[in-house]
Each structure stands twice: as C-alpha cells, then as structure tokens.
Amino acid sequence: ALLLGQGHQVSVVIGLGLALSSTAFGLQMLAERKELGSPHGRLAVAILLFQDIAAIPLIALVPLLGTLDSGAAAETGLRPVLAVIVGIGVIIVGGRLLLRPAFAWAVGSRLREVSTATALLLVLGTAWIMEHVGVSMALGAFLAGMLMAESEYRHEMETQIEPFKGLLLGLFFVGVGMSMDLRLLSAEPWVVLGLTLLLVGLKLPILMGLGRWAGGLDRAGAIGLGVVLASGSEFAFVVFKLALEQHLVDQRLHDLLVLAIALSMALVPLLMLGLARRLPARATDSLPSQDQDQQ
C-alpha cells in the first residue's frame, strides 16, 4: 500500500484487510478433504476464528480513520470513538441481560417461526445500533452471532437459522460479484494478476513457516495450512467497502483490491487440487466426543 502511494494509516488498513483469510472457503475445503480434525486443520480453524474476532476492531477502526482523515476530529473530539464504545457496550451488556429470557421464551413456544423471528430481530437490531453510531452493519451482525454463540440455546437457534446460511452467503458473494469492475481486469490485467499473485505468494510462505515452526506441523501439514489460508477474506470486502465510503481509498484502488481478493479465492481451490494430487488426503479419526461436540 505504501508503494501505491497511500498514507501510513490507510496502508495499515489495507495490510490488515489483506492479511485476513476466508473462513467460508477455508472451512469448506477442510471439510471436503475431511481434515478438520487433523493437526493443520485444527490450527487453521483456530487462526480463522482469531481473524474473525480481530476483524471486529478493524471494521470499527475504518470509520474512525475516515473521521480523522476528514478533519472532523478537530471539531468532534472523541465523540465518534465514544459512540462506538457505547454502542458495543450496550449490545454486549443488553444482550447478556435480555437474550436468555428472550431465547427461553422463543424456544419454549415450540414454534419454529418464533425462534427464527427472534434470531432475525437480534441480528437486525444490533446491525441498526452499529449503523446508528457510525459503524458497519456487518459488525453488528457479527456481534449478534457472538452473543448467540454464548447462549445456552445456541444449538436450537443454530438449527433454526441453518436454512438461511447458504442463501445469505450466496447473496453476499452475488453482491460482491456485482460490485467488481471487470473492465479494470481487461484494461490492466497484469496489475490485477500481479497483485493477486503477490497476495497469495506472500501469505503462502509466511503461513507455511508459522505452521512448521510455531505450530509444530510437519512439511505436508504446513503446506496444507498455507494453502487453506492463502486466499483473501470475505471480511476484506466489507473493510475495503467501508474504506471507499469513508474516502480513505479511491475507486480504482478499491476495485483492484476486490478483484485481487476474488481471484485469490478462485486460485486457492486450484492449489488445493494440485496439493491433493501430490499429497494424500490426511483424514484423521477424531474422538467420538469431539465429533459430537462439532455436531
């Protein structure tokens, strides 16, 4: 980002956004190869969960940087920061106090529609609060998911919203695809392809090294970890969209980043296919208790 002429603050946002890996693609590839219980599979899941949590402050940071960059901070002081902190605090505290009786009532009604409506109301409510304080609605939806995950009724609620997961994820990627400027790919193919290869080429050896020396994986496991996490993340689309709305990046840079991430998501499954031909599938026999917990 610094080489592209961006400032230090914007470069940090771009770097952190590109460092994230796709949870949807990563978990899907591990599940297809039955490697969720393998050493590199467990490490990949842990890294993806950590990245998803780390995406929360990153998404909250972008609007604040936009405020600072526009010079409004001189007039408003710490008001935007305090608004975000208060909004998150209200969601967390209110969620802990209200979710349990609300979910108990919804589950006790034994009506699937009531449970589904309760979950959707929670998501829409937290998303509205986050948008009201000047942060992305995606952050509110993510916080709602975290609150539901801590509830004792999470398994029941997960069953109710399961039919919506594939549909909403598909709609999300449809929206991303519609926002891609394919004319830029035809006009500057080498720039887009070079950025894509640079993204994957930098993340792959770094992740392999971390898996080998920090994670204690063997060579095959380190390669598998690197390939699974080498693509860009769906959270990066949200981060860069916010950066564009806050005028931290221009339209051309935003389109370049979106194209690079999308192409990296298309490239990684091909790398996984090549890896599958050279290395055998490393299915592991998990303990029965672990399988039951995952279900």
Image (cartoon, helix red, strand yellow):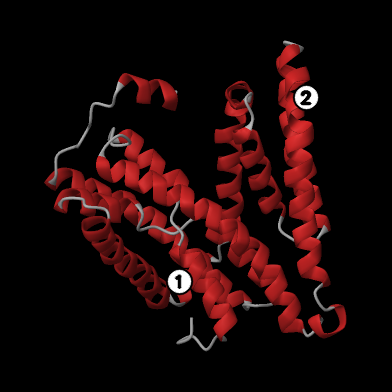
Q: Amino acid at mark 2?
A: Pro
Q: Position of residue 231 (x, y in %)?
A: 39, 57
Q: Residue visible at 65% across and 34% down?
A: 148
Instruction: Provide the secondary structure element on which disc 1 rests.
Output: helix
Of the image marks 1 and 2, the number of the one nearer the N terminus: 2
Q: Position of residue 89 (x, y in %)?
A: 76, 52
Instruction: Provide the secondary structure element on which disc 2 rests.
Output: helix
Q: Residue visible at 44% across and 59% down?
A: 232
Residue reaching furthest to the top:
110
In the rendered image of this protein, does residue 91 appear above or below residue 13? Answer: above
3D distance between C-alphas at marks 1 and 2: 55 Å
Q: Please tell me in which quadrant of the rendered image residue 131 appears.
A: bottom right
Q: Nearer the viewer, mark 1 or mark 2?
A: 2
Instruction: Pick whichever, 232 or 115, lies toward us.
Output: 115
Instruction: Pick whichever, 72 or 90, lies toward us.
Output: 90
- Can you identify the residue that label 2 sits on? 101
- Can you identify the residue that label 1 sits on? 186
Q: Position of residue 53 (x, y in %)?
A: 54, 52
Q: Can residue 121 be seen from the camera position used here?
A: no
Q: Can residue 135 be seen from the camera position used here?
A: yes
Q: Position of residue 195 (x, y in %)?
A: 40, 73
Say if mark 1 contacts mark 2, CB within 8 Å: no
Q: Residue visible at 46% across and 60% down?
A: 20
